[in-house]
Structures are given as structure tokens and as C-alpha cells.
Image (spheres, rainbow, N blue to C red):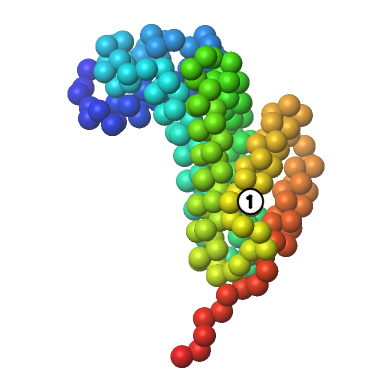
Amino acid sequence: MARLPSAERRRQLTEAAIRAMTRDGVPRTTTRSIAAEAGVSLSVFHYCFESKQELLESVITTITGHYVTLVREALRPRDTLRETVRAGFQAYWDHVSAHPGEHMLTYELTQYALREPGFEHLARRQYVMYQDTYADLIEQLRLSMRFELTVPVPVLARYLAAMTDGLTLNFLVLGDDAAWTNILDTITDHVAGLVREEVTTPNP
């Protein structure tokens, strides 16, 4: 077995945990099964992660990173703010459609953390991370396209986190149909309508 840097080995084990948990569910996934999925010994797992809490936190962060990278790239400025926002939502939705099991896992992780004594803080950290991620994306877009909002960034970030969370769960329950395009369009129009004015640079 090739020796890998610790950070790379942690990444390997985290991705293996995501695959195993998506397939088998969180309660039935053991450290032994994760090590087997990654093709490493159990001692390597315990060297990389001191606790199951640490592993679950890594899993939550990594899953979020999977789609945030795509959304960030999609938010490159286009001709209009609406087109830019719509592209960001579409990038997220494409990931949900392509990886429903991974998104289902995020809800299972939340429920597991809330029910398991001593793990409750992971659920809170998970949802705070969602809000912080949206706040970061909003600021990135606001600075690149130079506009102001009618609501504070933290308020919009929490709203978007709650909205996409509910929308994703609806998709997982109801499945794919033509309605989702219209729903994403409606959300986009709502967000674009929260822009008060574009900031212009004064002439020298």
C-alpha cells in the first residue's frame, strides 16, 4: 500500500465514507466498512480520524464542497444579474439531479446527529455552514457585479439555505418533473428582485 500524505489519506477516507454511507446508510456504516471501501487497514483510519464525530464533520464539509465548487464557477458574471443567479441555481440543481443519494445522505446525517447523544452540535454546524456558504457566494456575486440588496446578506443567506434545503427534499420525495424549471425561475426572479440598485463607479 502506497504511503500518502495525511491530508490526502483523510480525503480518500472521507470520499469512501460518503460512498459507503450513501449506499448503506449512516447507522449501518462502520469504521471497518469505510476502511474496506477505501482499501486501507483499520489502523490507517484511526490514525487519520480520532473520532466518528471528526469523520462526520469531514463528510458534511466535503459533500457541501462538491456542489459549492460548481456553483461558484457558474456564478461568473453574465449579461444580467438574473442570468447569473439562474446559472448558479441550475448548477446546484444539476448536482442534485446527478447525485440524489449524496444529497439524501445530508438529511440522514442531520437526523443522525440530532438523535445521537453528543453529536447534536454537528447538525447545527452543518446548517451554519450552509448559511455561511451562501453568504460567501452572495458577497462574491455582489462585489463582481456591483449591486446592493434590499435585505442584509445574512438574512438572504439564511433564506436561501432554508429554501434550497426544502426544495431539495421535495425533489428527493417527489422525483423529477417539468415543474422544477418553473420553480427555479420563480426563485431566481425573487432573488433578482431583492437588488436595490447597481453601484456605479464615479467618473474620474
Residue 164 percent location from the top left of the image: 66, 41
Residue 20 in sight: yes
Viewer-side residue, 148 vs 178: 148
Residue 100 percent coordinates (x, y): 61, 29
Q: Which of the pair 69/51 is nearer the observer?
A: 51
Task: Kindly identify which residue carries mark 1.
Answer: 155
Q: Could you classify mark 1 by the number of other residues whose Cα lies within 10 Å: few (under 14), some (14-19), or many (20 or more)?
A: few
Three-letter code for the amino acid on which mark 1 is drawn: Val
Number of marks present in the image shown: 1
User: How far across and how far down the image is residue 54, in percent?
Assistant: 39, 23
Residue farthest toward the bottom in the current orientation of the protein: 204
Q: Is residue 92 left or right of residue 15?
A: right
Establish if 97 lies above or below 114: below
**Hey, which quadrant is residue 190 in on the image?**
bottom right
**Residue at point 47%, 46% (across, down):** 69
Quadrant in which the N terminus is drawn:
top left
In the figure, 145 relative to 58: above or below?
A: below
From the top left corner, tell me how far across and down residue 56 is, in percent.
45, 23
> Could you tell whether 9 is left or right of 107 in the image?
left
| Residue 74 visible to an observer of this rendering | no
- At x 76%, y 46%, the residue is 183
**Dot 1: what SS?**
helix
Relative vertical location of residue 37 with respect to residue 66 in this rendering, above or below: above
Question: Residue sitting at 54 percent across and 14 percent down?
Answer: 116
Q: Which residue lies at the image location 53% right of the left edge and 11% below the top edge?
A: 27
